[in-house]
Image: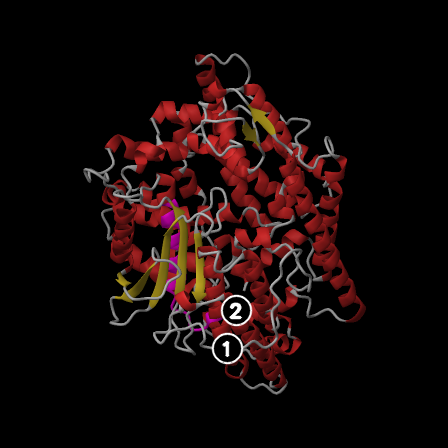
Amino acid sequence: MAFFLRTSVLTRHLKKSFLQNKRNSGYVVLIPEIGEDSDKNVLLTENGLPEFNDITIEKCIAAISKLSLDYESGVKQIEESCSDCKNAFVEIFQPLEKLDNQLELTWGVAKTLYLGNSSLMPTTSYIQIHQRAYKARSTKFNSVPIYNAAINEKNRLKQLTDEEQRLLDKYILEGKLNGLDIKGVKREKLDNILNLLQKERELFRDKVKMATNIFSSFISDEQLSKELPESLTKVMSINNNASKGPWKITLQPHIFEPFMQYCPDRSLRWNTWQAYVQRCSGYGNKDLETSTHVAQIRKYRAEQAKMLGFETYADMSMETKMAGSVENVYKCLDKLLENARPLQDIELESLQSFAKERGFDGKLEHWDIPYWQRKQKWSLYNYDEDKIREYFPLPRVITSLFNLCSTLFKIQIVERSNVHTWHKDVKFYDVYDETSNTPIAGFFLDPYARQNEKIRIYDDAGWHVSIRNKCALTSTDPLSALIFNFQAPSEGSQSLLSFKEVGVLFQRFGHALRHLLTKATYSEVAGLSNVEWDAADVCGQVMTHWLFDPHTIRAISGHYNTEEPLPEEIIQNLQNVRSHMAGYNLCRELYLSRLDLELYSKTTFWRDLVKELWPKYNALPFDKYDSHLLSFTKIFSEEWGAAYYCHLWSKMIAADIYSAFEEARAGDQDVIAIGKRYRESFLAVGGACQPSEIFRRFRGRDPSPQALLNNLGLSTQKKIEE
């Protein structure tokens, strides 16, 4: 279940190999092989929805242990029929669909509780449940008989639907990447490489965590603290009091990033930035150096790829990507860089002049950019998140979002009462199609932050949980949970969202629509399942583009007291804020994306690669002590090695998709017709067809980065105007 492994919160907690039976330190919930009260419907009510108000850890554990055993036993039975299989879809894949149904639901319920109310499902308990369910479900992708049956079915040369082809391709690719073609001594060698790789990744992760935690410095100057936002000084204060110091500076993202934006003391910014980029470099604590681990991780991944039949690890990564090849990614990155790099020079010159006009007499360095960038944005556009917040009361935004989806996709979203939930603030909605009187899908919405109950990470984008996939064989409809950490309403006032939080809501809901509106037959390729990594965020990103449409933003916004829409000046400035220093920001992402792919395509020493690539993407000179790569957890200890570019690729595809709506509007054509086509392609098909083919059906051509450049204000015309 690949999409479960991509969730950032799990990669922070589930650091050990899922296939290794290792114990975590501290309290451990032991998963019994057979639990009491283990009926398969123990977590469901009569209406088919989870009975959240009566679910306990013990019930989840009992259910997941029973279902996991049943699943593994079911896979063995299916394997026995593989050798003389006449029709793999009927004899193998349909029985596997039935096996998946209950295990997926119980797993999804546990994950929803974990993210929605961790007091009911603590991290240690959920990790045990996740590991047991993952181990069970992985058996079908590690089954040689099922792998061979998929190959044989594909070789029958009979006509297949797109969905059937994708289903076979998934089992074949999973088997290949799991090394099912490799036998004997070579297999032992591969297993040894994977074990060594996992250990190196764990060491890398642990050292970065220690290096991040070890740094701290303190501010005692009350006058300086007043320059920082109250939300920041509160978390920095060792007394948890915004107005009472001393205030502790750390490298944790929720402190480091806003501190660099707001701290007026340049020497403090320099010291903090140096500590951040020198983590694990060996310039400080030699015991926390990670350069050797970087080398070993690259070496083991290269060996893994070679044994599986790929030239490089980056080539292996492309097997699960829409881009298809490293060369295709490079072409896209180079096209974006061609426009972004010259504008970065202009942006930094402008920022230098802005800082000079305000008394700064030095040359801007890396640690100066966030501070002056924020001040320039405020000066140019009077952009104040707190003031904008007054125009986005949550109830109005949700109603407007649902109305927009109803208009575009011909659906109705209706709240259902008397549904069991995990908290009184949680609501349940049915999704109706215009052609049906019965719901085609449903979702829970949990909008508010609850201290000590919900998992929260800095700058999180909320959570979408696919509790249950659509499956025609078992007649089950999609079920989701959307979980956020928005400010709860206080007595007598509504919950007010910042514009950034409105974007979060739109993004996650657009993502959920791909799951909820799928029309696929097999759950294995329905909705978000089996979607290539670099296309996984596309539908969420498409939805956020509507926030920059003046008509849409007027409909969504309304002052919480007067109901007046957002002022026209602010509406115009939202686009200006999006494109502010877009060249500088984009070049940073392009650099990291290229560096990641180069690391897993070549054997060049990492620092030599950094020095080679840096001037091509960055106008500011490289600091000789800068060792940012040595704490780049996403590509070494998390799952994004040779895949960091994926988010940028999704943004490019989404911008191109949304440009079809813009073209229709500009040409006085039917925007609703474009919405219908979008639903029938991206939302309905999901993982049942290759995303490149879906895109061609929708746009009639291959993707282009031009729409993204236009949205960010990086087109040639924009450069000339600047």
Q: Residues within 10 Å of mark 1 (few under 14, many from 20)?
A: some
Image location of residue 218, percent across then percent down: 58, 26
Q: Are discs 2 and 1 less than 8 Å apart at CB?
A: yes
Q: In which quarter of the image is the C terminus?
A: top left
Q: Name the residue under label 2.
A: 58
Q: Which residue is drawn at 70% across and 57% down?
A: 305
- Amino acid on which the number 1 mark rests in the picture: Asp
Instruction: Compare marks 2 and 1 and give the one earlier in the sequence.
Output: 1
| Region of the chain picked out in magenta, as a range | 503-524
Image location of residue 693, percent across then percent down: 45, 60
Does residue 333 sit above or below 433 in this rendering? above
Q: Is residue 114 left or right of residue 207?
A: left
Q: Is residue 314 left or right of residue 187?
A: left
Does residue 626 sit above or below 57 in this rendering? above
**Residue 252 visible in this rendered orientation of the protein:** yes
Q: Name the residue under label 1.
A: 37
Q: In which quarter of the image is residue 500?
A: top left
Q: Which residue is drawn at 53% across and 60% down?
A: 4
Q: Is residue 12 left or right of residue 572?
A: right
- Amino acid on which the number 2 mark rests in the picture: Glu
Does residue 722 sit above or below 408 in this rendering? above
Q: In which quarter of the image is the N terminus?
A: bottom right
Image location of residue 443, percent across then percent down: 36, 62
Q: Which residue is drawn at 66% across and 59% down?
A: 17
- Residue 616 included in the magenta stretch of the image: no
Q: Which residue is drawn at 66% across and 57% down?
A: 24
**Residue 173 visible in this rendered orientation of the protein:** no
